[in-house]
Amino acid sequence: MKKFVVICTLSLMFAFAAMSEAATEWVRLVTDDAKGYVVSSHGNSATIDVGTSMGSRVGGLFLVYSEGNPVYDASGVLLSVEKIPLGVLKVRQAAGNFSMCGFVPPTNPAVIRPGDKVVPIAANVLKSLKFALAHPVLEPVYTEGFISQVPVEAVPAAAFGVPAAV
């Protein structure tokens, strides 16, 4: 009888561990997939490429942001990129692969542009956010065969092995 109890207990422990791993993976997938972009913005509405298949729902909130200054460690390795909050969108209609949204005050619709990034946000976080008054100015930067856009003066030339001007 003891062996049966031990086997059942171990089986349950492994089952819960597997479910926990699966749940963690699902949350990671949903949150990773829920990132999207502003597809269009005009008047008092915007369309994002996050739909019900990616977790969007009517009434859901999305933070609109632009990438700002890159953050490097002491050896010059890129750690992260600053997120500049531009505003918040509230989903009015959600379809399979896109959502129609309205602007949540104090979002300035003129600041939101196609190509800005969106991520889901909780309502309780809204009060702590401060939004940019204007869209960041970006210029192309050429690095190792790639072209990217970063804010003007965001990356020092020395970060790319270019000597400083004398």
Image (spheres, grey):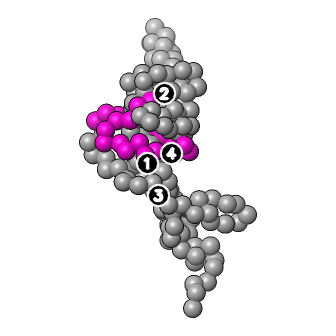
Q: Is residue 136 visible?
A: yes
Q: Which residue bears the numbered disc 4?
A: 113
Query: In the image, is 29 to the left or to the right of 129?
Result: right
Q: What amino acid does circle 4 point to?
A: Arg
For label 4, the crowd category at 10 Å Cα-Cα, with few meaning under 14, some 14 to 19 and many 20 or more, is many
- State the residue in front, 5 or 134: 134
Q: Tell me if residue 85 is in the magenta stretch.
A: no
Pointers 4 and 1 in contact (C-beta within 8 Å) = yes
For label 3, the crowd category at 10 Å Cα-Cα, with few meaning under 14, some 14 to 19 and many 20 or more, is some
Q: Which residue bears the numbered disc 1?
A: 111
Q: Position of residue 72 (x, y in %)?
A: 51, 65
Q: Position of residue 20 (x, y in %)?
A: 48, 26
Q: Position of residue 2 (x, y in %)?
A: 44, 12
Q: Which residue bears the numbered disc 2?
A: 100
Q: Is residue 23 visible?
A: no
| Bounds of the magenta segment | 100-125
Q: Tell me if residue 124 is in the magenta stretch.
A: yes
Q: Which residue bears the numbered disc 3?
A: 136
Sooner in the amino-acid sequence: mark 2 or mark 3: 2
Sooner in the amino-acid sequence: mark 1 or mark 3: 1
Q: Secondary structure at mark 4?
A: loop
Instruction: State the CA–CA distance, disc 2 to disc 3.
Output: 24 Å
Quarter of the image holding residue 54? Answer: top right
Q: Secondary structure at mark 1?
A: helix
